[in-house]
Amino acid sequence: AKITYHHADGNVDSLDAEAGMTLMMTAVLNGVDGIIGECGGQAICATCHVYVRDEYLDGLPAISAAEEEMLETTASPRDPARSRLGCQLTAGDHFDDIEVDLPDEQD
Ligand code: FES
């Protein structure tokens, strides 16, 4: 799977992600700025907030109650259609290739 992270300043990181790895973990393990993942993927910190590009929204899992609650607390504004927690999106299970925009702020 390939994950492309578009930074707020226009820079782009494009990474290969192993099946089973989340969008958050792939960023953290590869030192991608703009995703913190403070809670380690438990959906209790909202520092892995991303805006999924429109063409990749189809096929993503429904937002769980825990994710919904966290999306109400993001540092940068939530986009009703595109905001997700990167720790809840798993390569292989939920997407093959995906592109996301990173918010200005995560905390
Ligand atoms: Fe904490 Fe995703 S890493 S909510």
Image (cartoon, rainbow, N blue to C red):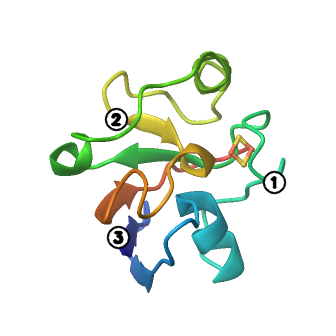
Residue, disc 1: 40
Residue, disc 2: 82
Locate residue 72 relative to residue 95 in the image: left or right.
right
Residue at left offset 69%, top offset 79%: 29
Residue, disc 3: 10
Locate residue 90 relative to residue 100 in the image: left or right.
right
Residue 4 x/y as whole percent: 36, 71
- Indicate if the residue with disc 1 has its beta carbon within 8 Å of ligand 1: yes
Q: Earlier in the sequence, mark 2 or mark 3?
A: 3
Q: CA distance from mark 2 to mark 3?
A: 18 Å
Check the image and name the residue furthest to the right.
Answer: 39
Q: Is residue 62 above or below residue 8?
A: above
The residue carrying pointer 3 sits among few (fewer than 14), some (14 to 19) or many (20 or more) residues within 10 Å by Cα, namely few
**The N terminus lies in quadrant:** bottom left
Give the image quadrant in which the ligand numbered 1 is located.
top right
Q: Is residue 101 above or below residue 33?
A: above
Mark 1 residue element: loop
Residue at left offset 66%, top offset 17%: 69
- Indicate if the residue with disc 2 has its beta carbon within 8 Å of ligand 1: no
Q: Is residue 1 above or below residue 8?
A: below
**The C terminus lies in quadrant:** top right
Q: Choose between 75 and 69: the one closer to the eye.
A: 69
Q: Do residues under tags 2 and 3 come within 8 Å of each other at their CB atoms? A: no
Q: CA distance from mark 3 to mark 1?
A: 26 Å
